Amino acid sequence: MIWNRTVAIGIGTVVLLGLLVYGFWPSATAVTVERAVRDSLRVTVEEEGQTQLREPYLVSAPTTGYLKRVPGAAGDTIGKGDVLAHLATLPSNVLDASSYEAAQAQVESARAALRRAEANATGTKAALTYAEEEYRRLQRLHEQGTASQQQLDQARVEAQQAHANHQAAQQTVAQARGELRAARSRVVTETSDPESLPSRRAIRAPVEGHILRVHQESATVVQAGTPLFTVGNPDSLEVSVDVLSSDAVRITEGTPVELVRWGGDTTVEGRVRVVPPQGETEVSALGVEEQRVEVIVDPTESSPQWQRLGTGYRVVARFVLWAGADVLQVPQSALFRHDGGWAVFVIQDGRAERRAVEVGHRSGLQVEITGGLREGTPVVTHPGNELSDGMRVETR
């Protein structure tokens, strides 16, 4: 009986000790694991950009005048030298009553002067006709010997004088007509149809292409230098991309670019044409000042959908800085700093083992491993601060 009690107490003690050991034994830490793999890897920089013309032309009014209504519209095809619009002389200002009466008097005076000049021209014409007839008559008499040489010379001089007087009278008539037109122009106070004003200057297209924008469609008075049209060749589209200066130093002329998310299903290949040596300070949407550089990209291919794009359209440019076809890589989230270098936790016999690694190129999510790992090695992603070397782990 005593023996049975002793056995029962011993068994209970062993079970209790086992429960205590099990309760205080450290449990395995749950971790997520991915394996080091060999695959293609690319280092890219992605930024938004917009299309623009390589050589847009802004056509402005060359002088102050009355712009007649523009017949063209955005999208119209134009040739070099085609007339885009017409500028007319400005209508006269409205006169007050006193000035109007004075202008009317000048018109009447100019009209009277014209009548006098025309009458004088008529008289000089008659005198010229008489002098010429008289000269021809004396020529015949001189040939017959009945008129002297002196009489013939006198008739010739009178005919020349009559001709000069008639030319002077005609010039006086022309002058009087000009003065009458000038006097009448000062009396004009309004015009019922501004489009009927005489055109004084034609605005012509500087290049062959399309009208991209009409800045002023309605007829109105414009000042010299007023923008009227933006014209250019839509086949010369390029892409302007603002990139951070820290990324721009890694971009060179000829860097391949993928133009995506522009509205089509395909990716348009491009090349960097210009990386300007000077950047500009811009403020981001979060209010942070950034140094940015305007990189210019030329598409190296065209598609029917791409040709539908116009200037000022949004695209996304993906700059390919480096690309490898067979690269050993792990997720970026597996790396952490250790002793001034980089390390990862690998899984070895159910335990986490810290291992130093050498890294190469980095993409947004993946990192090239150049030393310290082999293909297929399981590594812990997102290791927490509680994970340490040699700790038991279990995969989620």
Image (cartoon, rainbow, N blue to C red):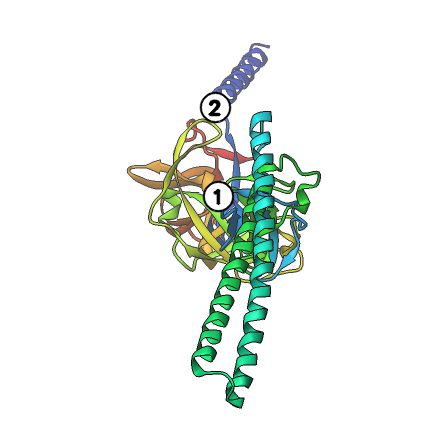
How far across and down, in percent of the image, does residue 234 sit? Answer: 58, 56
Which residue bears the numbered disc 2?
A: 25
Which residue bears the numbered disc 1?
A: 225
- Label 1: state its secondary structure: loop
Residue 311 visible, this orientation: no
Amino acid bearing label 1:
Gly
Relative to 266, does residue 93 appear above or below in the rendering? above
Location of the N terminus by quadrant is: top right
User: Residue placed at 48% from the left, 23% from the top?
Assistant: 25
- Crowding around mark 1 (Cα neighbors within 10 Å: few <14, some 14 to 19, many 20+) is few
Q: In which quarter of the image is residue 182?
A: top right
How far across and down, in percent of the image, does residue 262 sit? Answer: 61, 48
User: Residue placed at 47% from the left, 75% from the top?
Assistant: 156
Q: Which of 271 and 247 is in front in this view?
A: 271
* Residue 267 appears left or right of 348: right
- Crowding around mark 2 (Cα neighbors within 10 Å: few <14, some 14 to 19, many 20+) is few
- Which of pointers 2 and 1 lies earlier in the amino acid sequence? 2
Question: Which label number is shown at residue 173?
Answer: none
